[in-house]
Amino acid sequence: MCAFAASALVGCGSDRDKTIMIWTQMVPAERRILDEKLTEFATRHPEYADYKFKELYYETEQVRTNFMIAALGGSGAELVYGPSDNTGPFVKLGVIQPMEDMFDKTYLDGFISDPVKANTYLGGHLYQMADQVGNHLCLVYNKDLIAEPPKTMSELIKFGLAFTKDLNGDGKIDQYGLAWNYIEPYFFVPFIGGYGGSVMNDKNEPTLNTEAVIKAAQLIKDLRDKYKIIPRECDYDIANTLFKEGKAAMIINGPWSWAGYKDSQMNFGIARIPMIDETGLYPAPMVSPRGYSVNVNVKGEKRKVIADLLKFLTSTDVMLDFTKRAGTIPARKEAFDKVSQMLEQEVKGGDPKIANDNAILRGSLLQISVGRAMPVVSEMRVIWDSMRPNYQAVLGGSTDAKDAAKNMQDLAVKLIKEMNE
């Protein structure tokens, strides 16, 4: 019997001996590219003809939880793909293995360290190999609805008041200036940076009971309740649908969504989330790599197969194809430098689509420049879990922002203490 129910999704026994499964949280457009690359790898490597290379989608939280439980039970996918902040909890639980002995130093030295360190090392060991960097939130705007994105929060509010309308007179708003998954802490955190705050100090201690957290939470509530320029009820899918249907002029979203907007043939642009007028600071989204980690249960020949697969998936050519088709920022120096050089050159008399793609990448890099590196520590998981109920209580009206900030801090301190006991 399989050790974990979800392992039925990937099989047990002999069927798994010659399968390399990747559990991933990539969006559909990126997964289509990954599927193509897995097929291409199999074709290029006839010596692995008896192997099958597959991917399976889970939402970000599901892939993290399911992988931890499965790997602890001796099962789960051979590779798990996701943001670097998963690495800390994975290492703490012992569900992924060091990878540095699978690659030569020259290859590992080929990954970027600026604007963010691509590969994730903990305790001197490599635990995640990146294929892209960023994973950061930006302002995305529909160019058919708004010629120039707002540069300050006051400009955003002014535009939102003009654009947000009840078009058919039924008392319900039909279009919004902005929509995004503001109910989740990850999508709220940039605004804390806009008020000069952060969620954690350099000692991995929570810093949540601050004026920055209070003002950021109040701002989001005011955008919804005072100015009424964002939907009253909104999660990721609702926001994305409103944006794609032209019912929201702007959305705050990340690079994982670019490919889907391209597939929809949207005329969209990327910009920094507007500056907070009071501070003169731009909101600071978390910036991190995304990449692959190896299940601790993988042994023997599979490690060699996986090493070759990862060299292919993190090669310059594959990264540049993802950049071209999905708008992601590559993690290898050679690919990153090629993208940077391309952006430095003005497109004159060329393909307008190429020029637009360049603008998307340029806007994404501009947002990274004011972002903050995601801490790769187990304490970050506690930060998210401590913020969520208290921040959502502000939105729900059961507490005010000041009390919520204190409650966040108290809960985070308590949970981190319990985690380390």
Image (spheres, grey):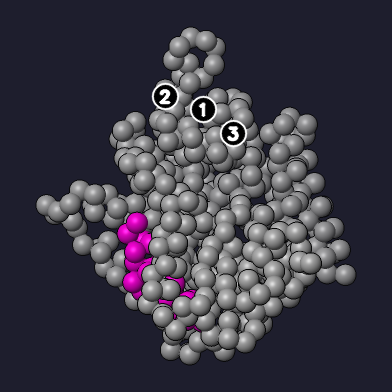
Are circles 2 and 1 on residues that touch, CB within 8 Å?
yes
Pointer 1: residues within 10 angstroms few (<14), some, or many (20+)?
many
Q: Which residue in the structure is indicated by mark 1?
A: 229
Q: Residue at x 24, y 54 (%)?
A: 354
In the rendered image, residue 405, in percent from the top left (x then y), is placed at: 74, 45
Q: Tell me which label, 3 or 1, sits earlier in the chain.
A: 1
Compared across the picture, whether 128 is left or right of 356 comes to right
Which residue lies most toward the top here?
169
Highlighted magenta segment, given as a residue range: 307-325
Q: Quadrant of the C terminus?
A: bottom right
Secondary element type, mark 3: loop
Q: In the displayed structure, would residue 314 be above or below residue 385?
A: below
Q: Which residue in the structure is indicated by mark 3?
A: 234
Q: Is residue 323 magenta?
A: yes
Quarter of the rendering containing residue 101: bottom right
Which residue lies most toward the left here?
349
Q: Which residue in the structure is indicated by mark 2?
A: 163
